[in-house]
Image (cartoon, helix red, strand yellow):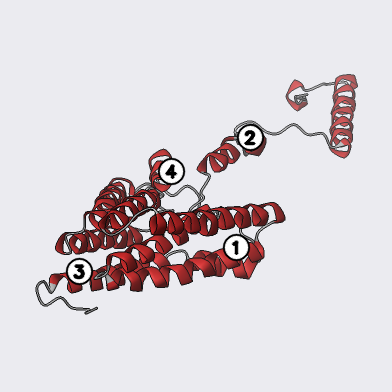
């Protein structure tokens, strides 16, 4: 199986560029898992996107093997299987017990059970070109679900009017990756590779448009950094807008605060008694002078 097609070298060029851009996309969650290892906590985010991405990569490898002639599709998805398996292993290591059990169940059910079922069905019930078509449509469905994952991030950006949880470089690489694999499918005359990347291109362009619209807006919070793939901005907004967490209004400087110190009250009473005694002495004198009388305010 040759890497470069003599008939159409653009297949190799687009596939190579697709591998490079997809490599960056696969490595995007790496800072998140570095933080997970340092804090030894998954910080509440979900593992489903990684399990689904692993399943999609396994399907594309199987599809490329059955189809033949799509070696570059095998290379990048082989790397995807390795990196997604690493992410899932780290998640299982540091996740709480319930999340760990849930991840293991989904992993066994989807990546083992469903994949084995697809393998057996396409091997025994479909032959030749019909096997490629059946497997191609199955791959399209799951690849579309992977590309649809950024919809949750897009929804959060629109709601919060902040792009702090959607890095601009990642939007560019997602768009570039979709374009390269779309061209790869076109040059290879493979509809099943082209279809999901049309959606990937649309989602990538939408993210770039949102960056242009909201890039000057203030961020939601400089201290709160939400993990990738699971950002619950609703909870953040609930905390910041809650009456229990509001900062009390400051007292206006024009109105002096009320004094409740007993020592100050005692001093005030002594001052008033002294002034009263002085007034009495002045009034009892033979020649009282009214100008010597002061005023006492309560």
Mark 3, mark 1: which one is toward the viewer?
3
Q: Which mark is residue 81?
A: none
Measure how far apart labels 2 and 3 are at the Cα level. 66 Å
Q: Is residue 82 above or below residue 193?
A: below
Which quarter of the rendered picture does the N terminus lie within? bottom left
Q: Which mark is residue 251?
A: 2
Residue located 33% across and 52% down the image: 134
- Is residue 228 something one can see in this rendering? no
Residue 38 position in % (x across, y down):
62, 70
Task: Answer with mark 3 or mark 1, whichever residue precedes in sequence.
Answer: 3
Mark 2, mark 4: which one is toward the viewer?
4
State if disc 3 and disc 2 touch (CB < 8 Å): no
Q: Residue at the left extreme?
A: 7
State if disc 1 and disc 4 touch (CB < 8 Å): no
Q: Which mark is residue 156?
A: 4
Q: Write down the residue under mark 1.
A: 91
Q: Write down the residue under mark 3.
A: 14
Measure how far apart labels 4 and 1 are at the Cα level. 23 Å
Q: Is residue 89 above or below residue 282?
A: below
């Amino acid at each position: 199986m040759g890497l470069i097609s003599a008939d159409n070298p653009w297949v190799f060029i687009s596939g190579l560029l697709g591998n490079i851009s997809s490599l960056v996309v696969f490595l995007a969650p790496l800072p998140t898992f570095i933080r997970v290892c340092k804090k030894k906590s998954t910080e509440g985010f979900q593992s489903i996107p990684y399990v689904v991405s692993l399943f999609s990569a396994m399907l594309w490898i199987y599809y490329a093997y059955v189809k033949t002639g799509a070696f570059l599709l095998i290379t990048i998805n082989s790397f995807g299987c390795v990196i997604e398996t690493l992410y899932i292993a780290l998640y299982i290591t540091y996740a709480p017990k319930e999340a760990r059990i849930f991840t293991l169940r989904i992993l066994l059910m989807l990546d083992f059970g469903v994949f084995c079922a697809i393998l057996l069905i396409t091997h025994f019930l479909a032959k030749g070109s019909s096997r490629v078509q059946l497997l191609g449509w199955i791959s399209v469905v799951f690849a579309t679900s992977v590309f649809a994952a950024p919809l949750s991030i897009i929804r959060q950006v629109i709601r919060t009017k902040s792009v702090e949880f959607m890095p601009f470089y990642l939007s560019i690489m997602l768009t570039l990756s979709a374009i390269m694999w779309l061209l790869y499918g076109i040059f290879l005359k493979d509809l099943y590779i082209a279809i999901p990347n049309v959606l990937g291109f649309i989602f990538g362009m939408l993210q770039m448009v949102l960056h242009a619209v909201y890039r000057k807006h203030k961020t939601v919070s400089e201290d709160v950094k939400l993990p990738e793939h699971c950002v619950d901005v609703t909870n953040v907004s609930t905390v910041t807008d809650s009456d229990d967490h509001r900062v009390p209004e400051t007292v206006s400087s024009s109105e002096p605060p009320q004094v409740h110190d007993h020592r100050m009250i005692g001093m005030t009473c002594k001052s008033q008694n002294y002034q009263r005694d002085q007034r009495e002495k002045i009034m009892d004198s033979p020649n009282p002078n009214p100008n010597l009388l002061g005023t006492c305010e309560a």
